[in-house]
Amino acid sequence: MRIDKLLWCLRYYKTRSIATEAVKKGHITVNGQVAKASREVFPTDKITLRKDQINYKLTILDIPQNRLGAKLVDMYRKDETPKEAFEHLELLKLSKDHYRANGTGRPTKKERRDIDDYLWDNEDFDETSKTE
């Protein structure tokens, strides 16, 4: 089975054309070699793919006949992705939530309330300095 079709069948990509695009960009390697979209994949092949800033590492156990339900995917692949990769992604998401670039203007109403709540919880902040 072609690598783009396999990644679509195993639900790593929503459409086959998105899977083909990822292969063309060089985000997919099979047994350590950058793959083309037409590359045939066989059981025991090791696939590495980069998606959403995570390097997934898979070992193919069997080749499915067509697209699978989400519960059946584990029968056809073994996921060897380290858990640290997912933890790192969570940290990136949390850090982006609280980042504000210089020069983006005044804080929004929600951001201002968050700042006030943070300052209110701080011990050094006394009642007289809080407005309204």
Image: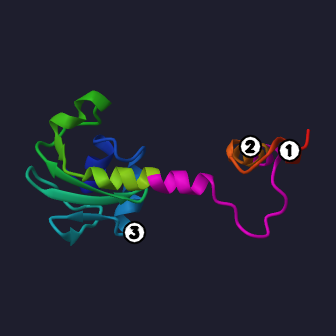
* Residue at horizontal 30 percent and vertical 61 percent from the top: 37
Q: How many marks?
A: 3
Secondary structure beneath dot 3 equals: loop
State the mark number for residue 29.
none
Q: Earlier in the sequence, mark 3 or mark 1?
A: 3
- Label 1 – label 2 distance at C-alpha: 8 Å
Question: Does the residue at mark 1 contact the one at mark 2 (Cβ under 8 Å)?
Answer: yes
- The location of residue 54, given as percent across then percent down, is 36, 57
* Residue at horizontal 36 percent and vertical 50 percent from the top: 86
Which residue occupies the foreground of this view, 115 or 54? 115
Q: Is residue 103 above or below residue 130?
A: below
- Image quarter hosting the C terminus: top right
Q: Earlier in the sequence, mark 2 or mark 3?
A: 3
What range is drawn magenta here? 91-112
- The location of residue 121, given as percent across then percent down, is 68, 42
Q: Is residue 40 above or below residue 11?
A: below
Secondary structure beneath dot 1 equals: loop
Would residue 76 appear left or right of 130 to someone viewing this image?
left
Amino acid at the residue labelled 1: Lys
Location of residue 66 (image quadrant): top left
Magenta run includes residue 105:
yes
Q: Which residue lies under the disc numbered 2?
A: 120
- Label 3 – label 1 distance at C-alpha: 53 Å
Q: Which residue lies under the disc numbered 1?
A: 130
Q: Is residue 9 above or below residue 69?
A: below
- The location of residue 33, given as percent across then percent down, is 20, 71
- The location of residue 87, given as percent across then percent down, is 37, 51
Amino acid at the residue labelled 3: Lys
Q: Is residue 12 visible?
A: yes
Q: Which residue lies under the disc numbered 3?
A: 25
Mark whose residue sits in front, 3 or 1: 1
Would residue 107 appear left or right of 9 to someone viewing this image?
right
